[in-house]
Amino acid sequence: MPERHVVYRWLSALGILLLLVVLVTGIVTLVQWSQQMKQQMATLTKTAEQSAQDARRAAEEAVRSSAAAEQARTDSRAAEAARTDALRQKSAAESLAADATLEAQTARAEVDKIRREREQEMGRLQQALDRIVDTRRTAFGLVMNLPESALRFDFNSSSLRPEARETLSRIAGILMTSDNFGLAVHGHTDDIGSDSYNQQLSQRRAEAVKDYMVSAGIDPNIVSIKGYGKASPLAAGRDDAARAKNRRVEIALTDSTIQYKGEAISN
């Protein structure tokens, strides 16, 4: 009996030992499985997070792409509108340029016509005046030379003689048949006497001619005067013939400047 109890005790111990071994093995296996599950969960979590990040980046990129596409469409529409506006402006500018060219050509033709008419008028005046006094054509207009024989003054006098008034009346009558001109009356003397004396005398004589022309009907606003004294002789020399030519009054007739559509026309 005692041996049987010993066997039972050993069997019991062995069973308990086997049970412990099985239990420990199960626990170890469970721990290993738990660790593997944790690793798998960590891997899955990391993969899920990466996928979520990738999804967010893809969504953000999609939003940016959509915004870029919309901006591109907007820019395209703006560019097309700008192109259309530029073409419209170009067409308008070309139309304005064509109109301006036509207007300039028309104005030039009218200017040339007016210039020819004024040239003919100056030629007519020269022919008429040349029958009264010596008249020459210059780059600035007509110059009427009234020598002492045509416009005589008494010695040291600026008073006009009756025959001088008659000559000036005839000149004024011809000038009043035209318009758009200016007159400059220049007095000259010979070389006898001082510069100051001759300058004052020539100024007074030029003024006397202007006053009479105005009284004959010439507009005073178109007449200017200047005395040159002996500073601008017509003939060289100091003999009586030269001095007689230098004692004179000159009346310069210049075609007035005409404003026609912004362009100055002068003779």
Image (spheres, rainbow, N blue to C red):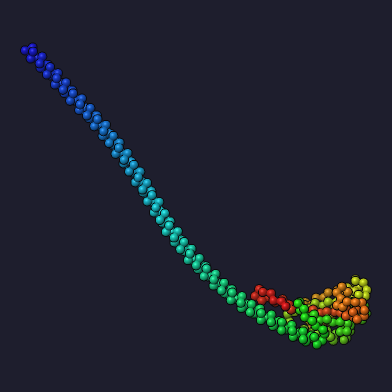
Closer to the camera in the image, 63 or 95: 95
Q: Residue furthest front?
A: 237
Q: Residue at x 87, y 86 (%)?
A: 163
Compared to 122, does 26 lie above or below?
A: above
Left or right, 246 with reference to 114 = right
The image position of residue 56, as x and y in percent, is 36, 46
Q: Residue furthest left?
A: 1
Q: Residue at x 82, y 85 (%)?
A: 133
Left or right, 103 with reference to 16 = right
Q: Residue at x 12, y 16 (%)?
A: 9
The image position of residue 33, as x and y in percent, is 24, 32
- Residue 158, by quadrant, is bottom right
Compared to 69, does 202 lie above or below?
A: below
The image position of residue 61, as x and y in percent, is 38, 49
Q: Residue at x 80, y 75 (%)?
A: 224
Residue 159 visible (yes or no) = no
Residue 59 visible (yes or no) = yes
Left or right, 181 with reference to 147 = left
The image position of residue 144, as x and y in percent, is 81, 81
